Image: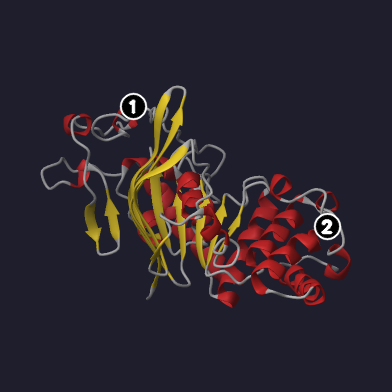
Amino acid sequence: MEKLLEVKDLEVSFQTYAGEVKAVRGVNFDLYKGETLAIVGESGSGKSVTSQTIMKLIPMPPGKITKGQILFDGEDLVPKTNKEMEKIRGKDIGMIFQDPMTSLNPTMRVGMQIMEVLIKHQNMSKGNAKDRAIELLRLVGIPSPEKRVNQYPHEFSGGMRQRAMIAIALASSPKLLIADEPTTALDVTIQAQILELMKDLQKKLETSIIFITHDLGVVANVADRVAVMYAGKIVEYGTVDEIFYNPKHPYTWGLLSSMPSLDSDNQTELMAIPGSPPDLTNPPKGDAFAPRNRFAMKIDYEMEPPMFKVTDTHYAATWLLHPDSPKVEPPEAVKRRMKNFSSERQHRKDDE
């Protein structure tokens, strides 16, 4: 498969009154054409900063890319000016934001917001742009698009506004679509519809997707590969099956343990990860997850673990993978979740 995006040793900091916040600390990942990569982790782990840095949307200052490369189609985006990035944003890279109500312009008709992208990046006439806007609204599943194209965002439901945001992001047929927690503000039923829509559109348009979320559960049936982030770093990286069936990092175990399951009964208790993420104005020595990790060893507080290779596609930054470390099994809650994941996947296949 051909690589579309390569992020190499990316570091991003923000200057604040409290000092320099090292929000992204040496992030590396690749994205292939037609693939979906999910980046998961708690709030504050650096997911959204990473995705917004790819589009050069972080405010500079106080934000600053202190190190690294972002190679898109072989071209480094880091040195590009804002004016140069304006030609790429919307045309080659589209973005779906978390809250469509604050992302859509409340004073402009929805159709005109789609048309703006088509007129700017595709040089379409106003008439052709309106016809295409109606096609896009129909494509994302909005009923009566001929009528809806002339309505304002407040006349749309939450799910329809998110569909309109997807239509805007797809207007110029971008090579890369970044979805930053696109279903967080939606109820479970609408969330499932939006996820199914994105899967369907990806098959039709062959767009690569970076899906940002704090919820591992929503990526199980959407992603090809998963990157787990903690304290500004990727701590585990693998295919969706490797992350769900064979997780290796204790933080990934914690995320899986906190997920509700379709097969869980009312007696099953969800496990919470104790403690809080570290203060990134002064990142801790060693493994940043050590204070919250009940399996932490002395070395976790002294040295940062490298990325250990599990398979050719699976890596995890934990000293538990060192040949000399004690053998530790995932907690029972994680084993149950792995077993339930297999059952849920079979349910979905049967439904299909």
What residue appears at the point 73 percent right and 46 percent down from the top-left corner? 101
**Which quadrant does the C terminus fall into?**
bottom right
What residue appears at the point 29 percent right and 32 percent down from the top-left corner? 290
Given the image, on which type of amino acid does mark 2 rest? Answer: Arg
Question: In the picture provided, is 297 more to the left or to the right than 4?
Answer: left
What residue appears at the point 38 percent right and 69 percent down from the top-left corner? 74
What residue does disc 1 label? 282
Q: Do we see residue 275 in this rendering?
A: no
Give percent across and percent down for residue 38.
46, 56
Where is 48 relative to 231, above or below? below
Q: Nearer the viewer, residue 10 or 233?
A: 10
Of the residues under marks 2 and 1, which one precedes in the sequence? 2
Residue 345, label in figure: none
Label 2: how many Cα within 10 Å (few below 14, some 14–19, many 20+): some
Q: Is disc 2 placed on a helix, strand or loop?
A: loop
Where is 69 relative to 58, above or below? below
Give percent across and percent down for residue 313.
30, 63
Q: Do we see residue 93 in this rendering?
A: yes
Residue 109, label in figure: 2
- Residue projecting furthest to the top: 18
